Amino acid sequence: MKSNPTADQMNRGEFIRSLGMSSAALMAFYCMGTTLSSCSSKGSDDPTPSTTPLPSTGITGNAEVSKGAINFTLSLADANFSKLKTAGQYVLVGNLIVARTAAGQYVALSKTCTHEGTDVQYRSAQNDFFCSNHGSEFSTTGAVEVGPASRPLTQYKTALSADGNSLTVTA
Ligand code: FES
């Protein structure tokens, strides 16, 4: 016996509508039951910057994005930052990582991995910035070289004083 095509179409339409309602209901449940970032259009690639406490000496100015434009100076004569006179070394300052690359250049980037917010570290052997949490790698300009991070680290400008004892970092 041949089935009624009109009834089939109605059944299919009802079936599709019921699927749509189920998907919407599932998504609503998912969004309510998980963290807000899971449902954000930016996904997890927009973590809140973490902040490394500043030492009491060797830095003047602002190193935290929440307090306005980044603009600070490190004294490389101070014990807190003197390691930056050595190629391949780095320090975490406020929301930033400041490194002296293997080639001797100064680089300042956001230290917060754009995947889920772990502090990155400078690796002199690879001359890159590495997140040990899930393995993201960034170039010395902050560009993503290896995911899962999909957005670059913010890059800041660096300027070394003529005597080599002060490093100024600006947005
Ligand atoms: S938090 Fe850095 S790779 Fe996931």
Image: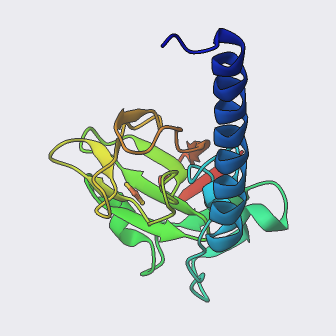
When asked about the image quadrant of residue 17, the answer is: top right
Q: Nearer the viewer, residue 164 or 42?
A: 42
Q: Nearer the viewer, residue 67 or 4?
A: 4
- Tell me if residue 153 comes above or below residue 57 in the rendering: above
Tell which residue pokes out farthest to the bottom in this image. 56
Image position, residue 1 (x, y; %): 48, 13
Image position, residue 101 (x, y; %): 31, 45
Q: Nearer the viewer, residue 14 or 103?
A: 14
Q: Is residue 61 visible?
A: yes
Ligand 1: image quarter: bottom left
**Taking 25 as reference, is 134 left or right?**
left
- Tell me if residue 169 comes above or below residue 126 in the rendering: below
**Taking 30 as reference, is 104 left or right?**
left
Task: Tell me the residue at 60%/81% (across/down).
Answer: 54
**Taking 129 as reference, is 35 left or right?**
right
Tell which residue pokes out farthest to the front in this image. 1
- Tell me if residue 72 comes above or below residue 168 in the rendering: below
Q: Is residue 170 visible?
A: no
Task: Tell me the residue at 64%/46% (across/down).
Answer: 23
Task: Tell me the residue at 45%/33% (across/down).
Answer: 143
Image quarter in which the C terminus is found? top right
Image position, residue 8 (x, y; %): 63, 19
Figure label count: 0
Image position, residue 59 (x, y; %): 63, 73
When asked about the image quadrant of residue 65, the answer is: bottom right
